[in-house]
Amino acid sequence: MANINNERDNFGSKLGVILATAGSAVGLGNVWRFPYMAGENGGAVFIIIYVLCVLLLGIPCMVSEFIVGRHGHANTARAYRKLSNGTPWTLIGYMGVLTGFLITGYYAVVSGWCLQYVWASLIGHLHGDPEYFKTYFTALSSDPVKPVVWTVVILGITYLIIEHGVRDGIERASKLLMPTLFFLLLIIVAASCMLPGAEKGIEFLFKPDYSKITSDVFLGALGQSFYSLSIAMGCLCTYASYFSKYTNLTRSATQIAVIDCGVAILAGLMIFPAAFSVGVNPDSGPSLIFITLPNVFQQAFAAFPMVGYVISLLFFVLLSLAALTSLMSLHEVSTAFLQEEMHTTRKQAALWVTILTAIIGAFCSLSLGNFDGLVFFGRSLFDWFDFITGQIFLPMVGFLTCIFIGWFVPHKVVRDEYTNWGELRGKYFHFYIFLVKYVCPLAILIIFLHQLGFLNE
């Protein structure tokens, strides 16, 4: 029988807490989704509304998950079970674990695409006219072998990190990956902003045109703020279970939100100056990263092909690192759950999660090809996973968590965690409770209805 260490690990430093948790939040949602959302929704006005939503919605929701995780000092399902005293509120935790598990599977597919683009950049395959890049991505996403292989590779890398535990695995990797990510981001931002005509892209990001504000812009920013912070996926709750009793939850949430917003804005500065420099529209949508940008970098640095090659390579390395930091947190949600609920070792739990999510990822990837058996009611299996988790589970778990913390958990328990048992002043505690009881649930309900099409213009 395996020797199981029942003592839970903790993060070893404040820096480790911030970088690991920020790594959970900083992912493809920032580097991929945010730029195309900003491009489609007016640039600067979208950013302003997004930042306000992070402050009023994101931070309180993040603190709520931190409170549950640290108080429970256990995996997400058990943490909710401890606070709910066996009531049906326990189901929130299980929903969070399930959501994180399902997202891990299909998110690994997109992460695998990033690795393929790194490889293609290294061997010089990413060159040609705009139609070539479109054909390349279509061929890659529908290929029955390559994406599956890369999905397994990125999950294998994640497993090697997770199996080493919190301090030696997640924290150590975060201390390496996050500074590298920031360094690469700054290099590409500098290169992009020095291009001829780049000032138009900078103006697009920072000079608001308030005439572009619509309900869809507002709701899009609201939804982006919710998803980009990894709320309701079990990640924040699981990571908080490794916090020490001295961790300032509100300060940590604020620092993570600032990093998240900073990376998102830098991603815009990385992309739009280069796009405007070569006359590419900023509203290229989800194809911006894999189809539009390789062509943008090639055109922007046409006079210096080697510079264009290096920038393109660094960009996809950056994208892969962002994907990996988020995959680590998603993987850890399920690993912690299996380890503690099934009473197994961390390595065994991590291996099972890797195998199961690789199977999910393989089927999701195959559903984007010519496999009619993996398409249901006009949607591929990949799209169904995205729809069910992103538009149903995430809003539902976030909404229920706010109701749970705001209305069910005794305020003394919440206040004790919020103030580190009286060590902190808790100056904004009543404002936090007001937001969690009223503002956040209403905002999340609006996101939910919008995602389902009930509030579209």
Image (tube, grey):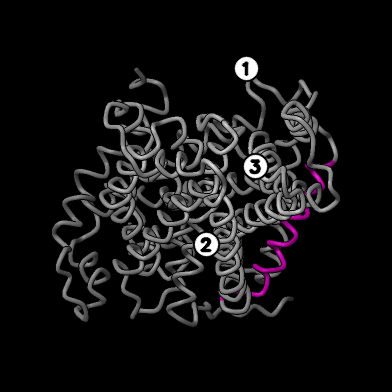
Residue 151, can we see it?
no
Give the mark nearer the N terminus: 3 vs 2.
Answer: 2
Look at the image and give the residue range highlighted in magenta.
146-166
Q: Position of residue 277 (x, y in %)?
A: 56, 39
Q: Is residue 382 above or below residue 246?
A: above
Under mark 1, the amino acid is Phe
Give the mark nearer the N terminus: 1 vs 2.
Answer: 2
Q: Position of residue 396 (x, y in %)?
A: 39, 39
Q: Secondary structure at mark 2?
A: helix
Q: Secondary structure at mark 1?
A: loop
Task: Please name the residue shown 58% across and 60% down the image.
Answer: 187
Q: Is residue 249 above or below residue 233?
A: below
Q: Is residue 11 above or below residue 145?
A: below
Q: Nearer the viewer, residue 275 or 290?
A: 275
The Cα atoms of the two marked residues, 1 and 2, are separated by: 36 Å
Under mark 2, the amino acid is Gly
Using the image, tell me which numbered label, if any, was put on residue 300: 3
Under mark 3, the amino acid is Ala
Foreground label between 1 and 2: 2
By secondary structure, the bulk of the magenta-drawn segment is best described as helix
Task: Please name the residue shown 49% across and 78% down the image.
Answer: 10
Tell whether position 366 is magenta.
no
Badge 2 density bin: few <14, some 14–19, many ≥20, Cα 10 Å = many
Badge 1 density bin: few <14, some 14–19, many ≥20, Cα 10 Å = few
What residue would you read off at disc 2?
23
Q: Secondary structure at mark 3?
A: helix
Q: Position of residue 265 (x, y in %)?
A: 44, 50
What residue would you read off at disc 1?
377
Give the mark nearer the N terminus: 3 vs 1.
Answer: 3
Q: Nearer the viewer, residue 381 or 311?
A: 311
